[in-house]
Amino acid sequence: MNISNDKNVMIFKQDNKYVAGISKKNKDGEYERAYFPIQFNQGVELENRTLIKIKNAWLSFYNWKNEDKKGTSFYIKCTDFDIAEEPKKENNPFEEFGNSITTESDFGEQIRLEDTDLPF
């Protein structure tokens, strides 16, 4: 599935892994945010909070299994993009907390994601 987007996408980096910040407006007019794993070509290095304009990307996946279960993880594979703006120096929505990542929702609730919730 090809992805086309005429808007800038913010890329967050943690431990040499990347996620794309995406948002949508809900029926109340408020924005909801989510983060989607994104993979770039080998050798691409981006700073945390870099805004890019995606020129060529598609939705991809990999299958995994461990002793207890198996599943499929989805990610964006981006092969061509332009840097739209220099990285923001504001707070990163991801903060390390032991073996998990924490962030706060727009409503001030703390959301805790375990390592198994994210592909990195």
Image (cartoon, grey):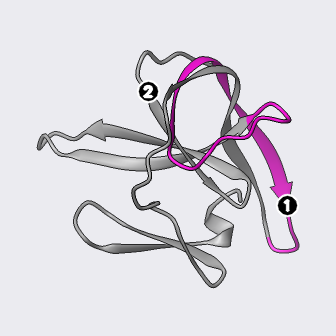
The amino acid type found where label 1 is placed reads Lys
Q: Position of residue 85 (x, y in %)?
A: 46, 30
Given the current orientation, which residue lies at the most extreme bottom position?
98
- At 11% from the left and 44% from the top, the residue drawn is 28
Residue where numbered disc 1 is placed: 65
Which quarter shows the C terminus? bottom right
Q: Which residue is mark 2?
A: 8
Q: Is residue 1 visible?
A: no
Tell me, yes or no, if residue 8 can be seen here. yes
| Residue 57, image x, y percentages | 65, 21
Upstream in the sequence, badge 1 or badge 2? 2
**29 lies above or below 97:** above
Q: Which of the two residues, 41 or 107, is positioned nearer the viewer here?
A: 41
Asked which quadrant contains residue 67, the reply is: bottom right
Above-or-below relation of 104 to 55: below
Q: Which one is in front, 119 or 50?
A: 50
Answer few, some or many: residues within 10 Å of disc 2's Cα (few below 14, many 20 plus, some between 14 and 19).
some
At numbered mark 1, what does the secondary structure look like: helix, strand or loop? strand
Label 2: state its secondary structure: loop
The amino acid pointed to by label 2 is: Asn
Provide the residue span drawn in magenta: 40-68
Residue at the image point whose x is 67% and y is 71% from the top:
115
Q: Residue at x 71, y 61 (%)?
A: 15
